[in-house]
Amino acid sequence: MMAVRKCESKQARIIAAQFRRLLLAGVIAVVSGSSVSAAPAADVFVSTEGNDTWSGSLEAPNGVDGPVATLGRAVEIVRSKKYAIDRRAGPLTVMVRGGTYHLDAPVVFGPADSGRPDQSIIYTAYPGERPVFSAGRRLTGWTQSPRGGWELKLSEVVEKNWNFTQLYVDGVRRSRPHLPKKGYHRIDREVAPSEEVRGRGFDRFGFARGDLRSAWQNSPDIEILILHNWSVSRLRPGRIDEATGEIWLKGKTRENWYKLTKGFRYRVDNVREALTEPGEFYLDRQSGILTYLPESGEDPQRTEVVAPRFEHAIILRPGTAHLRFENLTFAHNNWVTPPEGSTYSAGATGMPSVIVMAGVRNITFDRIAVRNTAGYGVSFGPGTMFSRVVNSEFGDMGAGAIEIGTGASSVAYAHLLTFQGDKTTASNLVENNLIFGLGRLDPAGTAIWIANAHYNVVRNNEIRDTYYTGIQIGGTLGFGVSHNRGNMLFRNLIHQLGQNVLSDMGGIYTMGISPGSIVSENVIHDVKAYDYGGWGLYPDEGSSNIVFERNLVYDTSHESYFLHYGQELLLRHNIFVNGGPTGAIGVDPLELYRKDQQINENIIVWRRQGALFRGPWTNSELRADRNLYWTLDDRSPQFSDGTTWQDWRGRLGRDVNSIIADPLFVDAAAHDYRLKPDSPALKLLGFPVFDPARAGRTSDQKLLADMPAYPRVFE
């Protein structure tokens, strides 16, 4: 019996119990949410027309009393009220009227702000209204620049109390001036790193004549954005030598394997001399003058311009519990490249989240919207348990959407998230969310990122339009100690990934040991890598003890399934179609540790010149059988190591009971990969039927339906 089957059996009762608990929590969430929104009754009201000296007990001002003006004041009132009405049945409710609330600081919740298991505290929108909490400031008082743009002097910038690198105009992300205007420069040649960083990264490269200028103004604020395979580096120029064609950078790439390789693409960001196109802005930190070149039709008196201020809008400190946030929108968090630059790894998990927490229990985000961010949306940091993000939408994100595990990052507020208690991150639910438009600041952002966490359920989400991976579970490369186990990825719809920007990605990506984890009934399509590695399912380094079953993967630039190295993986009951020119199932040719692999009862259809199994599968500990294979160009299966179909079955004893036959899809041209009743996969192999249409959201909340079109940024 394969070890993964033993592991699956061993964990079954635990996983089932956690799953039932999350399901029950979801049902309770729907019931309690419905009861709150049925009538405009609340313990505290918040309004843009309110006053923090008022009681907050009225939904509208009456001249002498009314709602409070800020969420922070509402939290204080609830903190005092909850003890006075300690025995009251039902939740305490804070109801927020519509409008935009520009925060003066992140709103911080602590243990004293917690609800109880029998009395949660709910922060929700007034029925029919949609309040927005902005971590930015609206900018007014513009003057016309002699050059045709708008100008605004910001004293806080001169005083070094404020800096920002993003700007939003009527809800649309605007860009700083960059070169080249379209596309990228390319590293002309490799240059040895300085002695200070040798062996730890790279800090120099050669550039083509004319690509970089030593005379650019404000060079300390310029950023060189370099696209590696699965990540980016943002480094500031130290010295630009046009005579030798070399640039020496401040800071270095992340590690020694993040090489500044000849041909790698790069862009020069925030160049004052390149401020020429409508929609661009430039912040001169020396003078404090912000210059914006307006798009046609924009007017300084009517157009809303917002600059981010804070890393976070909401911070939940360790010990906080039993809070719900419903029907609220969050936007405009800030991130500024550090002086030494930034070189985050895959996932860009060092970027800040609008909502961040650690050491919390039973926190629910239901029907929230997060947009126009610098980094992630929600971070369930270490110690977060029994918490949920459901029925929500995330769009135009600087990096990714949701982090679970060790990724809760903060610079200014890190002290609020540190604690000495149990750091186990487990039993969280991410369900029925729409996630789109990711990586607009760091293209390596991952939609849903899980690391060093267990028994989390990610189910029925739709992920689209991102430059990197859809969902990742991992945190520990190779076979080292891992806290991942029992994570369940069910019925997610993942598409339009990569888009020829980055490489080495998967619709679903795993790494490290993860006993009891199941990847099931997901639909993944249109994964397009820039160079290599646009895969559907991607078990990377050390992936072990994972079941991949009943997934549909089609139209990927590379293999539908690619294994770097790992052990005890089970691939069964999947449908793979059109896995790219390199093959259908791939394995890394340089890694030989692939112990106990099973590929059984799958439908695999491929076309073009690719091999069915690419890589040295003959040297792997592989058992394959009862699969259906079909090639769209009428060729027999071939293997890149020269093994024929006959040798594969006869000499190696694989796929003895497998067949080569047309699977008879309902309508492959329309991507309807359900099976007709007379499919040989059903009749001869007993292939279990699953409906790909069940993947994706179960309901459409339309929370960001009115969000303006967002820029592509990378190409």
Image (spheres, grey):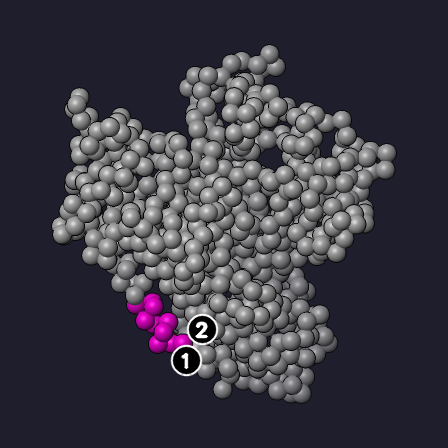
Residue 228, horizontal then vertical, whole percent? 67, 50
Q: Which mark is residue 141?
A: none
Residue marked by disc 1: 10
Q: Which sits in the foreground, 154 or 128?
A: 154
Return the residue found at the far right.
Answer: 243
Q: Name the residue under label 2.
A: 516
Question: Residue 6 in the image: x percent, y percent?
Answer: 46, 82
- Seen as rendered, the residue at the extreme left is 88
Q: Is residue 18 magenta?
A: yes
Amino acid at the residue labelled 2: Gly
Element carrying mark 1: helix
Residue at 20% from the left image edge and 57% from the top image edge: 118
Mark 1 / mark 2, whichever is N-terminal: 1
The answer to whether residue 6 is left or right of residue 217 is: left
Question: CB of mark 1 within 8 Å of CB of mark 2?
Answer: yes
Q: Which residue lies at the image location 21% right of the left edge and 33% below the top edge?
A: 56
Name the quarter where the C terminus is drawn. top right
Would you say residue 366 is visible in this rendering?
A: no
**In the image, residue 438 lies at what x, y percent?**
51, 46
Q: What stretch is highlighted in magenta?
A: 11-20
What secondary structure is the stretch in magenta mostly built from? helix
Residue 692 falls in image quadrant: bottom left
Provide residue 197's location: percent of width, then percent of height.
74, 50
Question: Is residue 471 placed above or below 81 in the rendered structure?
Answer: below
Report the side of 28 relative to 661 (left or right): left
- Front-most of 706 and 222? 222
Three-letter code for the amino acid on which mark 1 is drawn: Lys
Instruction: Check disc 1: other Cα within 10 Å, few if <14, some if 14-19, many if 20+.
Output: few
- In this view, the residue in front, 172 or 652, is 172
